[in-house]
Amino acid sequence: MLNGSLPQHEIVLLGAGHTNAHVLRMWRMKPVTGARLTCISDYPVATYSGMLPGVLAGQYPRERMEIDLVRLCASAGARLLWGKVERIDCVARRVYLEGRPSVPFDLLSIGIGSRPRGAEQFGDSPLIVPIKPMQSFYERLEERLKQWFSAHPGVESVQLLVVGAGVGGVEITFCLPAAVRHWLGDIKLELTLMDAETTVAPGTASRTRRRIVRELQRRGVQLVTGCRAVAVEGDCLVTSDGRRWPAAAVVWATGAEPAPLLANIDARRDDRGFLLVRSTLQTVDHDHVFAVGDCATLVEHPVPKAGVYAVRQGPYLWENLQRAIRGEPLLEYRPQRNFLKLINLGDGRAIGEYHGIAFQGRVWWRVKDWIDSRFIDKYQDYRPMMVVEPPSVKQHSDGTERQPPMRCLGCGGKVSASVLSRVLHRLEIPRHPQVLLGLEQPDDAAIVRIPEGSHASVTLDFFTPPLDDAYLAGRIAALHAASDCFAMGGRPFAALAGITLPYGSAKRQEELLYEILAGAVRELRQMGATLVGGHTIEGPRLMVGFTLLANQPANHHFSKNQVRPGDRLLLTKPLGSGVLLAGHMRAMCRYRWYEKLLEWMLKSNQPEAEFAAEGRASAITDVTGFGLVGHLMPMLEAARVGAELFLDRLPVLEGARQLIEEGIESTLAPENRGWEPKLLADPTMRQLPEYKLLFDPQTCGGLLMAVPPQHVDAWEEYWKERFGEGNWWIGQIVGPELAGQVRLIRDSSP
Ligand SMILES: Cc1cc2nc3c(=O)[nH]c(=O)nc-3n(C[C@H](O)[C@H](O)[C@H](O)COP(=O)(O)OP(=O)(O)OC[C@H]3O[C@@H](n4cnc5c(N)ncnc54)[C@H](O)[C@@H]3O)c2cc1C
């Protein structure tokens, strides 16, 4: 997280393949002083291809081949940006991402792998299942086969094609039958392995190929070589010789071709389109841009695209990034001529080859399992090594430490006017008819107009962002602050930013401020508001907050004391963000949980507030730092009523229960438990994770609404249309006999 001072060097890893992942792992053990490491990935998880066939064969669970980038980055103190890169400008040193600000770098390592050649010629035909992205291959194939199976009830056999008879395609072919049995049950499988070339496993010795062919024959796999797939017609693959091959699915596992992104990088490429690099792994054109693994071609020692080279490049990349920062000469990587090749046969045996000698048997599978397990174990250790605080000292050129100049406080602690004006110039701030004087003509204060006969509500909220991603932090901070207005029935129209930036150079502060405000402005625009001013100072840690002004109907607002006995209680977002964020700080939040956590935190409460505004709620509050009970209690006390909460109906974010059971909780939770004496519950209930979640502080939490019974149907319809699933009635308001108390009910079924 951004504490202390801003980094002097920005190192960016694009893609977390075999080589870049090594840098993340080493960073975890030995971060580079004064530098920040950012990993940009299109998925929050990376896969180890060496184990994919074993996963298909049922030899490993799926998680075994996965490197959880959310956890690995959190444990390393590295920033993970999850998104789609559109272009890289190596001269301007910027990575451009879809839908968010570009990311600057001082050093960049591109390791985005390759994709199977020619899959795109079939458009998005559901018949073709490309092996990449490997992260989703298993699900895509399973879904396709299950869909096909349910569309063909009663079939007794299934035909499958694997196109691409390289080593990868061969291994998939051997391991696929177990996966098909697992998904479809005991069905007869007719498997064909096809390639446009005339040999299988090119690049291996003829003795190895003979063993592969014998194994294929023994299993009844049809091997078709010299046959090129050219089209898809319904559920048939058509080859260049005019033959049609009916199949339930075609696994596309052809040789490597470059990802389209490589064409949008201003660096020279080879005749196939892969980035050309020197033996230092630097691109031929740019000393500060490295390219590794499949996406790069070594000018002096070209080698086939194989994971083993990507793995071996890891230590060279790690060392060279550090040397580049220190301005020292770089190491030269020379690929080995030969390496041990092991092909998983899916039945507890493997075919192997070393120095042209082929072998086969159970012992080789055990060797492969040992090598792969040793490799993946290193990347599945997510224990944080240390709390990484960027240093507050800089170094002289002779390496001695220099204290930062004393920073001024008071107004001298403001971020410079030039940083601010450059950021404001870069932002596209929407106009608003009620803003008479705003940031397009900055003055001492903004002037806004409140339409005659209406009122304005005002609120302020700020926090230390729980994520390292400043753009998302800006979005979350704006949504979090606006939620107070929504809970009052107001519509925000103007916002003032209050931001503390860590110490650092003007350039770094500008980037950080821009990312935060770009995120915030995106959300403000979405809710129909604009940014009119604010205050930005320097301080020891990043803080972000917003004051919001909202139009408030003159005759109506939701006050807490309007709840009535008989009202049903509705919660619009699941609980658990506090414990998940606490887990994230300890590198314990799994990527699947993190995906959902972000999704819910970035969901605005505005649509539900607007639906409620049409008389469909008697009182609303937003659930934030004090947790569900801490926000419910003031409602009950104000109206002198009580409530019943159904523990079995509480919506809970995936992973929250598990983290609670692992002993994690947010630091504010114990304070929030101050309400416990007001809860009527038996002791066993108090041990449940759901009970503990009543006190979990929420970031960008949902709205808690008291809904009069006559509006329950309208809400159920609304909920179904918007989310397509059940609604979250979590309890009800009861009379004054329970005033200021909550009775917990474990099982709400009648
Ligand atoms: C089934 C199969 C089995 C294989 N088995 C072996 C083997 O046993 N031994 C061997 O040596 N080789 C094997 N290979 C080849 C090996 O997988 C590749 O050579 C290796 O993965 C290349 O490593 P890499 O780091 O370059 O890329 P990858 O491992 O492919 O990693 C690239 C990463 O970049 C991410 N990425 C892609 N595009 C973007 C983007 N635009 N923005 C951000 N991130 C992006 C991807 O999600 C991915 O995580 C196998 C291949 C297959 C298909």
Image (cartoon, rainbow, N blue to C red):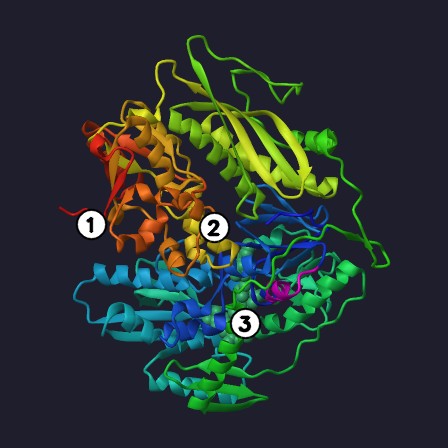
Q: Amino acid at mark 3?
A: Lys
Q: Bin the neighbour count of mark 1 within 10 Å (Cα to Cα): few under 14, some 14-19, many 20 and up.
A: few
- Residue under label 1, please give it: 747
Q: Front-most of 367 and 412?
A: 412
What residue is pinned by disc 2? Answer: 581
What segment carries the magenta color? 22-32
Q: Residue at x 37, y 55 (%)?
A: 125
Distance CA(mark 2)–CA(mark 3): 24 Å
What secondary structure predominates along the stretch shown in magenta? helix
Circle 3 sits on which residue? 378
Q: Amino acid at mark 2?
A: Leu
Q: Is residue 165 left or right of residue 507?
A: left
Q: Closest to the observer: 461 or 369? A: 461
From the viewer's side, name the closer residue of 329 and 28: 28
* Residue 224 image point, x, y percent: 40, 76
Q: Are marks 2 and 3 in contact (CB under 8 Å)?
A: no
Residue located 57% across and 60% down the image: 112
Q: Is residue 25 magenta?
A: yes
Few, some or many residues within 10 Å of mark 3 (<14, 14–19, 20+): few
Quick one: which residue is furthest to the top in this view? 452
Quick check: 531 above or below 682?
Answer: above
Please report whichever mark, 2 or 3, sits nearer to the chain's N-terminal start: 3
Q: Secondary structure at mark 1?
A: loop
Examine the rendering and report whether any part of residue 603 can be seen.
yes
Foreground disc of the pair 2, 1 = 1
